[in-house]
Image (cartoon, rainbow, N blue to C red):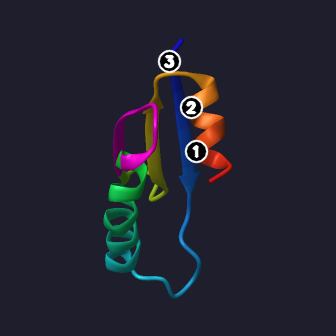
């Protein structure tokens, strides 16, 4: 069964939007290289919070990625 990982966060005070976006871009190749990765979406909600979602092919793949 596919698993959707959802991370919602606010940046620390003093951290610029461009820094968050650059960090998200930098980690993309790492996520793509992990077994079981199907897709990733990253963006900002209307509330101002950042939302990072990763779709995995299984819970086992998601847990393995979290342990890397």
Position of the C terminus, as image quadrant, is bottom right
What residue does disc 1 label? 65
Residues in magenta, as a range = 33-42
Give residue 26's position: percent from left, percent from top.
35, 68
Q: Tell me if I can see residue 21 in this picture.
A: yes
Q: Which residue appears at 56% of the width and 31% of the height?
A: 61
Q: Earlier in the sequence, mark 3 or mark 2?
A: 3
> Real-space Cα distance between discs 1 and 2?
6 Å
Q: Which residue appears at 54% of the width and 39% of the height?
A: 6
Q: Judging from the image, what secondary structure is the residue with disc 3 in?
A: loop
Give residue 55's position: percent from left, percent from top.
44, 31
**4 sits to left or right of 19:** right
What residue does disc 2 label? 61
Is the residue under label 3 in contact with that under label 1 (CB below 8 Å)? no
Say if 59 sits above or below 8 in the image.
Answer: above
* Disc number lying in front (1 or 3): 1
Is the residue under label 2 in contact with that under label 3 (CB below 8 Å)? no
**68 sits to left or right of 42:** right
Q: Which residue appears at 59% of the width and 77% of the height?
A: 12
Give residue 35's position: percent from left, percent from top.
46, 37
Position of the N terminus, as image quadrant, is top right
Q: Judging from the image, what secondary structure is the residue with disc 2 in?
A: helix
Say if 20 sits above or below 32 in the image.
Answer: below
Q: Which residue appears at 57% of the width and 83% of the height?
A: 13
> Real-space Cα distance between discs 1 and 3?
14 Å
Q: Residues within 10 Å of mark 3 (few under 14, many from 20)?
A: some
Give residue 33's position: percent from left, percent from top.
38, 48
> Real-space Cα distance between discs 3 and 2?
9 Å
Between 12 and 2, the one nearer to me in the picture: 2
What residue does disc 3 label? 2
Between 3 and 30, the one nearer to me in the picture: 30
């Amino acid at each position: 069964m596919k698993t959707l990982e959802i991370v919602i966060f606010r940046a620390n005070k003093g951290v610029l939007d461009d820094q968050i976006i650059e960090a998200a871009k930098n980690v993309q190749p790492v996520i793509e290289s992990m077994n079981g990765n199907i897709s990733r979406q990253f963006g900002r909600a209307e509330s101002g919070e950042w939302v990072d979602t990763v779709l995995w092919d299984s819970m086992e793949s998601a847990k393995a990625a979290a342990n890397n």
